[in-house]
Amino acid sequence: MALFSPLEQRALQVAKSFIGTKEATGRNDGPVVSRFQRFVAGGASWLLGKAWCVCFVVYCVKMASRALAIKSRLPLTASTSQLYRWYKRHGLLLTGPKPGCIGMLRGGPTGHRHTFLVHEVEEGVLITVEGNWRNRVCWNKRPAAGSDFGPIL
């Protein structure tokens, strides 16, 4: 059983509370999806209809930090590649996955294409909680290879 920091534990609790939430039409939309997007956009609507995996992760971490009355250092971003570059610039990339971290799937035109929360690591396989995976928030199982990782902070 993994030992999570209070922030990691709370962020995963927040994320799991949304499991089953679906997009309204399959076009990155719906009331809960727009809540994640507007949160990252500071209430503005410019992110509506855009991919929301990073918005989901950032929202979960920020809500967890508020509940614990601590300040999260995670940047408000809607881009997996920007999140990766932020971790790299600050020397915060992990050497491998650990339960309670953020995963960033490599690929796509800008270097990274999907963000998720790692719940468990089992012999190179990740058990994750993901937003915008198959148009919903869900559990997923994916190989650790092909992803980079950063701490929830």
Image: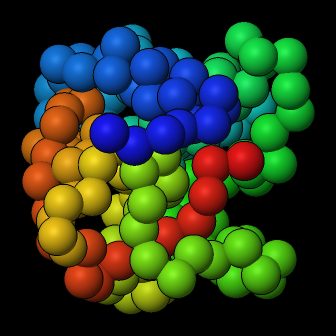
- Specify the quadrant that holds the N terminus: top left
How far from the left and from the top, in percent, is residue 27?
A: 23, 38
Q: As rendered, which of 54 and 3 lies closer to the eye?
A: 3
Does 30 appear above or below 93?
above
Residue positioned 44% across, 87% down in the render: 111
Q: As rendered, which of 141 and 121 lies closer to the eye?
A: 121
Does 151 appear above or below 129?
below
State the colouring used for the structure image: rainbow
**Horizontal side of residue 129 vs 112, given as left or right:** left
**Horizontal side of residue 123 vs 79, given as left or right:** left
Residue positioned 48% across, 46% down in the render: 100
Q: As rendered, which of 115 and 31 lies closer to the eye?
A: 115
Residue positioned 56% across, 23% down in the render: 10
**Horizontal side of residue 63 vs 120, given as left or right:** right
How far from the left and from the top, in percent, is residue 77?
A: 66, 53
Does 22 appear above or below 92?
above
How far from the left and from the top, in percent, is residue 110?
A: 47, 85
- Residue 18 visible in the shown view: yes
